[in-house]
Image (cartoon, rainbow, N blue to C red):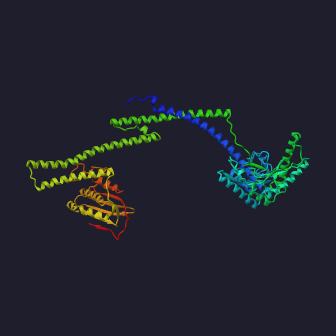
């Protein structure tokens, strides 16, 4: 017995070290990942909540900017609630419900404070999405509020044609551009890179810079409202123009001085639309009375601020009839609460997390040590059993207490014991087979040698009788060698079968005819009986060999006056070929071994009562090669029944009556 493995190299020590390292790494990684994942998930959730709030605000703001009285708000509220999983409610400023995503039966009280105020004319720029204007902070009117500035279909077509011409001109010079249509229907060119100023010099389309008749009419109304506001403030009126180049669409502005078309009177729609044919002219308008430019800077700044305020108030007054009135927006969870996720890892939580990690580590080490000890103990027993098997020691290879262990170790021990028992049986069978083969070959060879030596010494004459005897012994040797070759081919899986549809009746008749003379010589009645017309898919030569071995064995063990019967019948999807005799029978203890190689019922191994001892083994191999099986039944002193079961080729067809062929 080799010495024990050092502790530092033992499986127990390695398993413990690896388990500790894995536990430490897993606990640390789990804690870090849990903290990171939780905080990341919370940040993502908070970001998603803010994004959903901004989307809800922008969608409902667009509804209010498109029509008065919040028409279409109910459908928008329900769609937003389904997509975000939030409760969305819209009320007037005195908290009368306009639209609520919650069912009327589940209306819970709304929070005391609204999430936002929806006013298309006073947008909350922190929630409104997509406002990229330079003056978004100053201009709080939603760009989707168009009102009287919405272009007619004819104006849109003509402006679009002008924009297409400008884009085509830029494309000829290799400058990419996009045509963007504003909320009111006015198209404009967006140029990301125009290094040579081609749009202003060669591809300029003045029609896109001039207000249309619809816009001019609305602008005049706005100008009158602005002038009234300035007069109320005791200031000189300012001229209001339309900035058509804004990113969110045309926007009225007031400034002094301003630029107006060269014609003194307001142009007609046809005049403005035909301006696309030429570059157009612009001139500085005469100064309107107002504060002295050379006066104090504070007065000029005050006048500019007043002009901006008046234009803004006039715009709201002009657009108010076209938009919805201000409303309160409530965004809550489905149950009506407005809880927001939070995360805090305090000192107590940190200590709790560290204690839990230490407990997990301790439990892991203890459980791993116990499992390792229980695992290595049966492994050591298996190692000792393997060494005993190597030296050929008798007895049970693995102790019974190891076989009774739970789990995979017991399965391994049981499999090891089964393997050892099977190996022992194979070794005994191999020794017996070598002895049997030697005995079977020695007898005919001894007979041949004895007769040849006698003939050489002149003791016997080489007459035909001697030659016949020698030939019989040679044929016996050939028969044994052929049987061994068939068994070797069957064991190696190289036994060749030429399958074809075969009538079982023909096989029975041919076998009976081949053995009839021998049966008559032994005084045994041999007959074949066929029930129906069963058919099998088989190699006819091999099948005749298998049935012939059974018939030959039955005749050999049936005394004079007995009978041997071959019966063929079908049972559903199987065909049964039975060989029954009224011979000596086989003892119940010997019956499990009848298909073993070189087995004989007569242990004396005489030629009169036994053949080579390979016939039944060949029958079993041939039946298995045909995807069938063979079984044996016997009663000592009464006879035996051997049944070959083969798959049916085409089912059993019943005949009018049973056919018996002697």
Give the image location of residue 311, x and y in percent. 84, 49
Residue 405 or 543: which is nearer the viewer? 543
Give the image location of residue 34, x and y in percent. 62, 39
**Residue lying furthest bottom in this view?**
656
Left or right: 405, with 554 as reference point = right
Left or right: 386, with 197 as reference point = left
Counting labels gives 0
Residue 608 makes an appearance in the image:
yes
Q: Quadrant of the N terminus?
A: top left
Give the image location of residue 418, x and y in percent. 38, 43
Residue 497 or 108: which is nearer the viewer? 497
Give the image location of residue 90, x and y in percent. 77, 52
Which residue is drawn at the image coordinates 41% and 35% (left, top)?
A: 381
Residue 363 makes an appearance in the image:
no
Which residue is drawn at the image coordinates 23% and 53% (left, top)?
A: 479
Left or right: 308, with 204 as reference point = right
Residue 297 or 406: which is nearer the viewer? 297
Q: Quadrant of the C terminus?
A: bottom left
Residue 64 or 152: which is nearer the viewer? 152
Left or right: 568, with 446 as reference point = right
């Amino acid at each position: 017995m080799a010495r024990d493995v050092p502790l530092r190299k033992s499986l127990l020590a390695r398993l413990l070290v690896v388990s500790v390292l894995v536990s430490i790494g897993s606990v640390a990684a789990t804690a870090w990942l849990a903290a990171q994942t939780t905080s990341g998930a919370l940040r993502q959730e908070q970001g998603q909540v803010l994004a959903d709030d901004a989307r809800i605000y922008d969608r409902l703001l667009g509804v209010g900017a498109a029509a008065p009285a919040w028409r279409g708000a109910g459908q928008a509220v329900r769609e937003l609630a389904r997509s975000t999983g939030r409760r969305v409610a819209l009320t007037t400023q005195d908290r009368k419900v306009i639209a609520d995503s919650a069912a009327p039966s589940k209306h819970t009280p709304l929070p005391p404070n609204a999430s936002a105020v929806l006013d298309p004319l006073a947008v909350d720029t922190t929630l409104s999405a997509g406002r990229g204007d330079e003056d978004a902070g100053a201009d709080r009117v939603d760009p989707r509020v168009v009102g009287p500035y919405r272009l007619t279909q004819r104006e849109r077509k003509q402006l679009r044609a002008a924009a297409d011409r400008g884009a085509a001109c830029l494309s000829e010079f290799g400058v990419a551009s996009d045509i963007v249509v504003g909320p009111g229907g006015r198209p404009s060119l967006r140029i990301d890179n125009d290094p040579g100023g081609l749009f202003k010099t060669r591809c300029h389309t003045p029609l896109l810079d001039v207000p249309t008749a619809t816009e001019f009419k609305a602008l005049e109304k706005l100008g009158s409202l602005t002038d009234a506001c300035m007069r109320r403030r005791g200031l000189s009126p300012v001229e209001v123009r339309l900035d058509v180049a804004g990113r969110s669409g045309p926007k009225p502005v007031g400034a002094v001085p301003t630029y107006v078309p060269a014609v003194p009177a307001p142009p007609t729609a046809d005049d403005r639309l035909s301006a696309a044919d030429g570059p157009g002219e612009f001139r500085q308008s005469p100064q309107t009375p107002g504060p002295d430019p050379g006066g104090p800077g504070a007065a000029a700044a005050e006048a500019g601020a007043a002009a901006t305020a008046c234009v803004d108030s006039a715009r709201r007054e002009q657009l108010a009839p076209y938009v919805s009135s201000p409303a309160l927006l409530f965004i809550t969870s489905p149950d009506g609460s407005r809880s927001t996720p939070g995360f805090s890892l305090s000192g107590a939580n940190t200590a709790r997390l560290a204690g839990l990690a230490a407990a997990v580590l301790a439990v892991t080490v203890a459980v791993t040590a116990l499992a390792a000890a229980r695992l290595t103990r049966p492994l050591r027993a298996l190692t000792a059993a393997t060494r005993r098997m190597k030296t050929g020691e008798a007895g049970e290879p693995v102790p019974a207490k190891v076989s009774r262990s739970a789990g995979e170790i017991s399965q391994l021990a049981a499999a090891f014991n089964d393997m050892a028992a099977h190996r022992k049986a194979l070794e005994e069978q191999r020794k017996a087979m070598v002895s049997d083969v030697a005995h079977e070959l020695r007898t005919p060879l001894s007979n041949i040698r004895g007769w040849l030596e006698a003939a050489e010494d002149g003791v016997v004459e080489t007459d035909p009788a001697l030659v016949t005897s020698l030939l019989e012994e040679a044929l016996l040797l050939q028969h044994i060698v052929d049987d061994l070759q068939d068994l070797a081919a069957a064991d190696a899986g190289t036994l060749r079968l030429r399958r074809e549809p075969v009538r079982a009746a023909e096989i029975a008749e041919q076998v009976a005819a081949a053995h009839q003379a021998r049966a008559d010589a032994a005084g045994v009645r041999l007959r074949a009986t066929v029930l129906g017309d069963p058919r099998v898919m088989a190699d006819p030569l091999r099948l005749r060999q298998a049935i012939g071995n059974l018939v030959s064995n039955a005749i050999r063990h049936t005394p004079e006056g007995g009978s041997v019967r071959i019966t063929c019948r079908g049972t559903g999807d199987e065909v049964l070929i039975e060989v029954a005799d009224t011979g000596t029978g086989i003892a119940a203890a010997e019956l499990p071994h009848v298909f073993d190689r070189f087995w004989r019922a007569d242990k004396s191994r005489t030629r009169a009562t036994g053949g080579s001892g390979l016939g039944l083994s060949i029958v079993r191999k041939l039946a298995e090669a045909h995807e069938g099986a063979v079984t044996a039944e016997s009663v000592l002193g009464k006879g035996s029944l051997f049944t070959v079961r083969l798959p049916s080729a085409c089912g059993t067809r019943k005949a009018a009556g049973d056919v018996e062929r002697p």
